């Protein structure tokens, strides 16, 4: 039986660059607009406009049953939050996930931001620490990919980065994935240690690494909207993600204009452009 390879050709990886950069542009536009009083529906419109004006399609809206450009998860909502008309409040921790399809190739990325609240600086500081630990674990996973033999090493690196810096919980029901012609492809990319080694890390592998980290219990439930994933203990949550390509000369973060240079610098890894 024919099995589709998870590895892309150099030409295919090059085709993914535009989708990655357009995804980054949409998230940059959202990041610039996010503040107390703005609704996540308004942020959704900004992301959609950026992607369409850039010649792409919002790939989240291509998922059956979902009609928005971003997922916007606020406070105890971890992932898959549906944009709504609730104005964001000071101190909210907000995770924005977004993707673009350009010419049938996909990008996928996410970031978390904590809105300033002068009246509750301790709350803001706690939530920013959660976001910082999550972001650091993402870059630890990306850096690991640069020298890994098998994909399970990435999950171990993500888990180690979280556990060495905090007592935060790691979601196990939701993980990263391969990316390419489809936004979600094989192989699975775990954010924690697993016994199965997974596929070899070699030229042509393209994956989305996306740790989801919570203040307390990693147990979640899905809201009645059938999308929004929320912590059972109402603990705050953070989600960071990048799409990354492995090629003959190294790795390149497809959803970062600098290929991930800034995020990888603390780990001593220098990304290599895709030739």
Image (cartoon, helix red, strand yellow):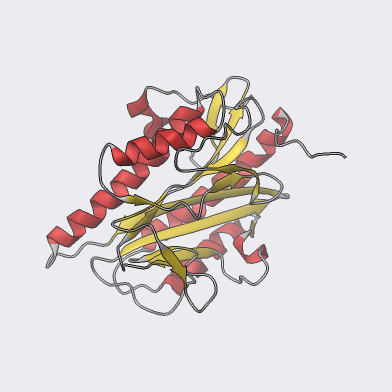
Left or right: residue 29 versus residue 186 is: left
Can you tell which quarter of the image residue 136 is in? top left
Instruction: Tell whether 218 sits left or right of 181.
Output: left
Taking the spot 59% from the left edge, 46% from the top edge, the residue there is 177
| Quadrant housing residue 207 | top right
Q: Residue at x 57, y 35 (%)?
A: 196
Q: Nearer the viewer, residue 78 or 181?
A: 78
Return the residue nearer the eye: 31 or 204. Answer: 204
Q: Position of residue 182 (x, y in %)?
A: 69, 50
Residue 275 higher or lower than 41, as above or below? above
Residue 232 visible in this rendered orientation of the protein:
yes
Q: Quadrant of the N terminus?
A: top right
Q: Which residue is farthest top?
A: 249
Q: In the image, residue 34 lies at what x, y percent?
A: 36, 63
Which residue is found at the position 29% from the left and 46% from the top?
132
Q: What quarter of the picture does the C terminus occupy?
A: top right
Image spot of residue 57 (x, y percent):
65, 59
- Left or right, 96 with respect to 64, comes to left
Residue 229 visible in the picture? no
């Amino acid at each position: 039986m024919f099995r589709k390879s998870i590895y892309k050709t150099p030409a295919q990886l090059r085709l993914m660059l535009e989708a990655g950069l357009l995804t980054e542009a949409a998230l940059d536009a959202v990041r610039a607009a996010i503040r107390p009083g703005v609704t996540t529906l308004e942020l959704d419109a900004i992301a959609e406009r950026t992607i369409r004006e850039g010649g792409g399609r919002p790939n989240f809206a291509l998922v059956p049953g979902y009609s928005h450009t971003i997922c916007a998860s606020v406070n105890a909502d971890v992932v898959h939050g549906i944009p709504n008309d609730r104005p964001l409040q000071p101190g909210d921790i907000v995770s924005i996930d977004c993707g673009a399809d350009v010419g049938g190739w996909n990008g996928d990325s996410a970031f978390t931001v904590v809105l300033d609240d002068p009246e509750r600086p301790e709350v803001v500081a706690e939530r920013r620490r959660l976001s910082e630990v999550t972001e650091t674990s993402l870059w630890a996973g990306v850096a690991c990919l640069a020298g890994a033999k098998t994909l399970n090493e990435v999950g171990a690196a993500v888990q180690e980065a979280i556990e060495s810096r905090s007592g935060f919980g790691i979601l196990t029901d939701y993980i990263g994935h391969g990316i390419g012609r489809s936004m979600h492809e094989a192989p699975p990319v775990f954010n924690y240690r697993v016994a199965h080694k997974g596929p070899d890390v070699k030229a042509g592998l393209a994956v989305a690494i996306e740790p989801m980290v919570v203040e307390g219990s990693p147990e979640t439930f899905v809201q009645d909207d059938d999308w929004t994933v929320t912590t059972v203990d109402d603990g705050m949550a953070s989600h960071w993600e990048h799409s990354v390509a492995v090629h003959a000369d190294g790795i390149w973060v497809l959803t970062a204009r600098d290929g991930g240079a800034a995020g990888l610098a603390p780990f001593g890894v220098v990304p290599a452009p895709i030739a």
